[in-house]
Image (spheres, rainbow, N blue to C red):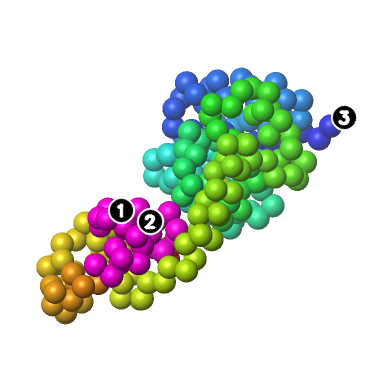
Amino acid sequence: MKKQHNIILADDHIMFLEGLHTIISEIPEIGDIHLATEGQQVIRLMKQFPIDLIISDINMPKMDGLTLLAEAKKQMPEVKFMILSMLDDARTVQKVIQRNADGFVLKMADKKELKKAVQEVLKGEKYYSEVVKKTYMESVFERKKHQHVELSQREKEVLKLLSEELTSKEISERFFISVNTVETHRKNILLKTGSKTTVGAVKFAIENGFLDD
């Protein structure tokens, strides 16, 4: 008899959660299934029951899926964690991989792929949808292509505040420098990133990790 694995399904959309429960319960290896509609509830369930796998959406109230992923791995390193989301942009994919998720499947996947992903992850394997892997490889290529771009520490600080929609005057007051100096930094940022606008520079910086902590 195969080992029964206890899991938590987390999603703030009840109808989707119930449908997911129906699909997952068809997998022979699955034992108890606990449902959660927000991240903090998952943490509480982890403390109350023996859990082998967590399957979670990213967008949830109180604690998003990425924060939950990091917290769950911190509290219980052996627990498997799989992301199930509609989000497949490069930034999200990078964060999921950086946080050591065991799987990432898109919500548009069919039942067969979802079941396969769960079984692979429970066996100790990693499982990422083909679209997710393609997005990640393209993002790695883009990051390598732009590795020659170097921003000074002050330029990064200015860019971060620009991304928060502060004006040049507000930034000048924050750093005790002139507005002209801020504008010079902004122009240098545009030049180095090959961007035409501040919005373009911020987008470039986010996609290439220049604003990572």
Q: Is residue 118 above or below residue 160?
A: above
Between discs 3 and 2, the one toward the N terminus: 3
Element type at mark 1: helix
Say which residue label 1 marks. Answer: 200
Q: Give the x, y percent position of residue 90.
A: 48, 47
**Pair 3/2: label in front:** 2
Say which residue label 3 marks. Answer: 1
Q: Give the x, y percent position of residue 27.
A: 72, 25
Task: Name the side, left or right, on which 180 lies relative to 189.
Answer: left
Tag 2: residue type?
Answer: Phe
Report the residue at 71% width, 30% height from top.
116
Tag 1: residue type?
Answer: Gly
Q: Which mark is residue 204?
A: 2
Label 1 Cα neighbours within 10 Å, binned few <14 / some 14-19 / many ≥20: some
Report the residue at 70% width, 45% height from top.
126
Report the residue at 49% width, 39% height from top.
88
Residue 122 lies in the magenta stretch: no
In the image, 53 versus 47, the foreground residue is: 53
Between discs 3 and 1, the one toward the N terminus: 3
Q: Are marks 1 and 2 in contact (CB under 8 Å)?
A: yes
Range drawn in magenta: 187-211
Q: Are marks 3 and 1 in contact (CB under 8 Å)?
A: no
Looking at the rendered image, the quarter that the C terminus falls into is bottom left
> So how many labels did they put on this image?
3
Q: Main secondary structure of the magenta part?
A: helix
Distance (Cα) linking label 3 and label 1: 57 Å
Task: Name the side, left or right, on which 23 lies relative to 139.
Answer: right
**Pair 3/1: label in front:** 1
Tag 3: residue type?
Answer: Met
Q: Are marks 3 and 2 in contact (CB under 8 Å)?
A: no
Q: Is residue 82 visible?
A: no
Distance (Cα) linking label 1 and label 2: 6 Å
